[in-house]
Amino acid sequence: MDHAPLPIAGDAARRAIGALLREVAQQQIVPRARAPGARLKDDGSWVTDADLAMQRQLQIELATRWPAVALLGEEMSAQHQQELLRVEAAAPDGAGLWVLDPLDGTSNFAAGLPAFGPSLAWLQGGRVRAGWVYDVMRDELFSAVEGGGAWLDDTPLRAPARERALRQALACVDFKRLDAALATRLATRPPYASQRAIGSVALEWCWVAAGRFDIYLHGAQGLWDYAAGLLILHEAGGRSRTLDGDAVFVHELQRRSALCAGDPALLEAWAAWLAAAR
């Protein structure tokens, strides 16, 4: 097979790609924070000049280093995204595919709320092989390699074991993407102690991995939203599933529900409550 070496060849590659993500974000996102240039896309979501500049520069930088690896970015047409996934699936032993959300938490960025950043995953052979999420304002870089663990900057990341009941948990819940009946029940008769939402799917996954949230629920998120964060959580020892009990990751564009916890036993209690509530 005639292509450059695969992107992930050990810890040095993980660190190098993370450093690149941080560098490009500092160049393209930070200077635009005071004048984001936000506008609505046809689907009703926000896009800013930083989203577009980040995707454009990172695509150039990655292609320079690994020309055989294509990039699927959020700011591409669905037709283009679908074709990239089709090509990657047809070559399971090939160079793989980058999946990028250039600025997860765009509405936060546009509003001046300090929770946003890029999320980059590497898919190969129908699996998420590596992932990076950069919290721009906290200057925290989360990363993971399949089978190689998760990291917060240069420190190995392990989701802390929680010897607590579901009723004691701090939850991260995105209500607007849930069925109205379930959202109402969660709001009026919650099974947990307290609830937050920060508006960045990628960071929410990572904050569960870091123990900042105990449990998580989101009704519909895209591949570029969850791919990197899901791997980081799993490599940190956490677990996840959809509301229907399936694996969250699929090699498709379809949006997925997700519930997760850093502690597997707490996830079981959370999933059981949700199943009964639905």
Image: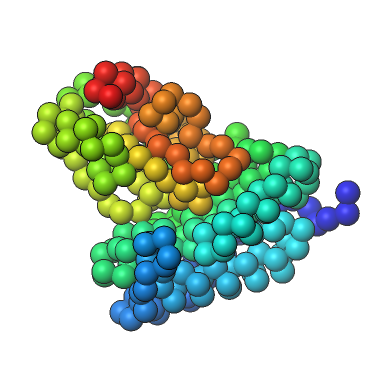
Front residue of 181 and 126: 181
Front residue of 156 and 248: 248
Q: Looking at the image, what colour scheme do you see?
A: rainbow
Quarter of the image where the C terminus is located? top left
Q: Residue furthest left?
A: 188
- Please indicate whether residue 46 sits to the left or right of residue 196 in the image: right
| Residue at the image point whose x is 35% and y is 46% from the top | 204
- Please indicate whether residue 156 sits to the left or right of residue 97 in the image: left
- Please indicate whether residue 265 sits to the left or right of residue 72 in the image: left
Quick check: can you spot residue 138?
no
Answer with the quarter of the image where residue 81 lies: bottom right
Please say if 81 is above or below 275.
below
Q: Residue furthest right?
A: 1
User: Residue 106: x and y, percent?
Assistant: 37, 64
Answer with the quarter of the image where residue 188 lies: top left
What number of labels is visible? 0
Please say if 272 is above or below 171.
above
Q: Residue furthest front?
A: 42
| Residue at the image point whose x is 58% and y is 73% from the top | 57
- Please indicate whether residue 3 sits to the left or right of residue 159 in the image: right
| Residue at the image point whose x is 26% and y is 64% from the top | 113
Quick check: can you spot residue 84?
yes
Answer with the quarter of the image where residue 92 lies: top right
| Residue at the image point whose x is 80% and y is 57% from the top | 4
User: Residue 63: x and y, percent?
Assistant: 70, 66
User: Residue 60: x and y, percent?
Assistant: 65, 71
User: Residue 253: x and y, percent?
Assistant: 55, 46
Please say if 13 is above or below 19.
above
